[in-house]
Image (cartoon, grey):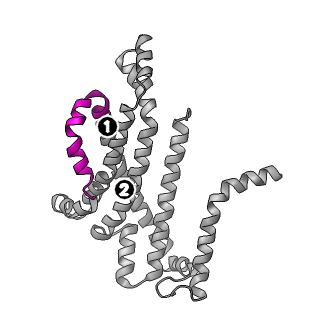
Amino acid sequence: MIKFLSTINKKLLSFYIIIAFFILWEVAPRIGWANPQFMPPLSHVLASAKEVTLVKILLDTCVSLKRIIIGFTLSTILAVPVGFLLGGAFPQISKFFKSLLSFLAQIPPFILFPVFVIIFGIGEKGIYTVILWSAFWPIMFTTIAGVQNVDPLLIKSAKSMGSNNATIFLKVIIPAALESIIIGMKTGMSMAFMMLIGAESLGADSGLGWLIRNSQSMGFVPRIYLAVILVAVLGLAVNYFLQWLEESIIVWK
């Protein structure tokens, strides 16, 4: 029993600080440590969910989740093959375009949002493009790094056993680069989430980013914090999913 409780305690250890944070959030405005007008107690924030209605919250959450899934999936579908091509099939081209790619990757997606709006118009296409741009670069660069860091001895050993290029690619290069690719996907997802909320706050009529902007314009401070909590929970859930995916696929780690 003691061993079981110890195991549960270790698993929940990282959540204790979150619980302490929420307790402090509830207490601080009530005892004067924070101005309740600008930082309402957590109970007031949660109570504001009744005003927004559960259906509206779920709808905005699902809309944001749909946008992040579609944009992130498109960026992964594009970035991974490009990374394999530049990292393995055409490494010289990668060196040739390295400066240009690094230059483009340094452009903040949020700055490009007005350009995307001009090209694609206000709406879903502009938001998807911002998400795609945000996640594309970290996934592509980590894929290139993962391919280039594959141990040459593994490739030579596979060739000495008579493996053809397709087998080497599938059995050696992809497994060796997979951990690096998933790291890039995690980074890309974090970037995509940040840009999603910003894009929704400027060019959308639904979603969690829109909820934050609408609450701000209407002066509903508790709703702003409620939307922030929802964004954090959604991001945490997606991050845990990617962590589970990594542990499920990379069994040799």
The foreground one among 51 and 30 is 30
Location of residue 83 by image quarter = top left
Secondary structure at badge 2 equals helix
| Residue type, mark 1 in image | Gly
* Marking on residue 192: 2
Side of 51 relative to 104 (left or right)? right
Q: Residue at x 48, y 54 (%)?
A: 238
Q: Earlier in the sequence, mark 2 or mark 1?
A: 1
The secondary structure that most of the magenta stretch takes on is: helix
Q: CA distance from mark 2 to mark 1?
A: 19 Å
Q: Residue furthest right?
A: 1
Q: Is residue 97 magenta?
A: yes
| Residue type, mark 2 in image | Ala
Q: Residue at x 59, y 87 (%)?
A: 30
Task: Identify the residue position indicated by label 1 in the image.
Answer: 83
The location of residue 111, given as percent across then percent down, is: 24, 63
Secondary structure at badge 1 equals helix
The foreground one among 103 and 79 is 103
The location of residue 154, given as percent across then percent down, is: 44, 21
Q: Which residues are magenta?
A: 81-108
